[in-house]
Image: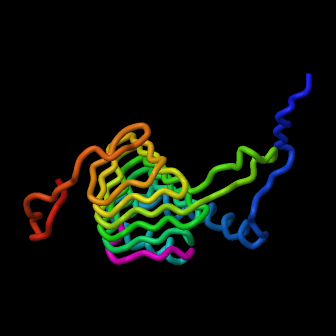
Amino acid sequence: MSNERGQVDLSRSVTPWSAGMKARRLVWEIVRPLFFRLTPKWLFWRWRRFLLVLFGARLGEGVKIHPSARVLMPWNLVCGRNVVIGADVDVYNFCPITIGDNAMVSQRTFLCTGSHDPTDPHLPLIFSPIEIGAQAWVASECFVGPGRRIGEGAVIAARSVVTKDMPDWMICAGHPCKPIKERTLTGESRAGERHYA
């Protein structure tokens, strides 16, 4: 019986990468588990920043990236000052992921710039950048989809699924994620700077 909708054919891979890009990825996939992943958690922040910058990342001062975080393509990672990327975060950045100053991405979150074209029988890779605003917090085990923007100061509650842009200074939650209430800052940190409610 024939399928009038057509047939999916995964017999050939359709990827946009040149030979040079594939070689660059191969070198990083050798370096990352040996010289990034195996470093001590608290002692080698600068070393891990150095490795990422060596491979093309643009990182501000004070960026802290956990050794178990997986950055697919360092050259597509842009972070402002004092960004924190937690344990087991998957930075799946086929194209740029930009994270603003003093933003935090908590453990086991998946930042996903890539998908596949479901209308093409060969399911080619498609991708779109992600932007996380300054002072935002993406809590544990969230999924942020391709092309999404998380606003400045926004909070994305744990295990939320972000399929649309989230506004500035809102606490957002759910599956799919939606704005819930305004975020306000209260109190002072020990250093005299504002901390987040």
Measuring from the top left, give residue 158's x and y in whole percent. 34, 42
Residue 154 lies, in percent from the top left, at 30, 56
| Magenta-drawn stretch contains 59 | yes
Vertical arrangement, residue 92 with respect to residue 180, above or below: below
Instruction: Reply above or below: 163 against 49.
Output: above
Q: Quadrant of residue 92?
A: bottom right
Of residues 151 and 67, which is closer to you in this image?
Answer: 151
Q: Please say which color scheme the image uses.
A: rainbow
Q: Nearer the viewer, residue 184 or 96?
A: 184
Residue found 49% across the figure and 58% down from its top:
37
- In the orientation shown, which residue stands out farthest toward the right? 1
Residue 139 painted magenta? no
How far across and down, in percent of the image, does residue 14 sit?
Answer: 79, 55
Q: Quadrant of residue 176?
A: top left
Main SS category, magenta section: loop
| Residue shown at the point (41%, 71%) measured from the top left | 79
Q: Residue at x 91, y 27 (%)?
A: 2
Looking at the rendering, in which quadrant would you find the N terminus?
top right
Q: Nearer the viewer, residue 25 or 122?
A: 122
Position in image of residue 101 (x %, y %): 32, 71
Left or right placement of residue 130 versus residue 195 in this view: right
Q: Left of 70 or right of it: where is 134?
A: left
Image: magenta residue range: 55-64
At x 35% / y 61%, what residue is drawn?
151
Instruction: Give left or right: position of 192 versus 125.
Output: left
- How many numbered circles does the render carry? 0
The furthest residue to the top: 1
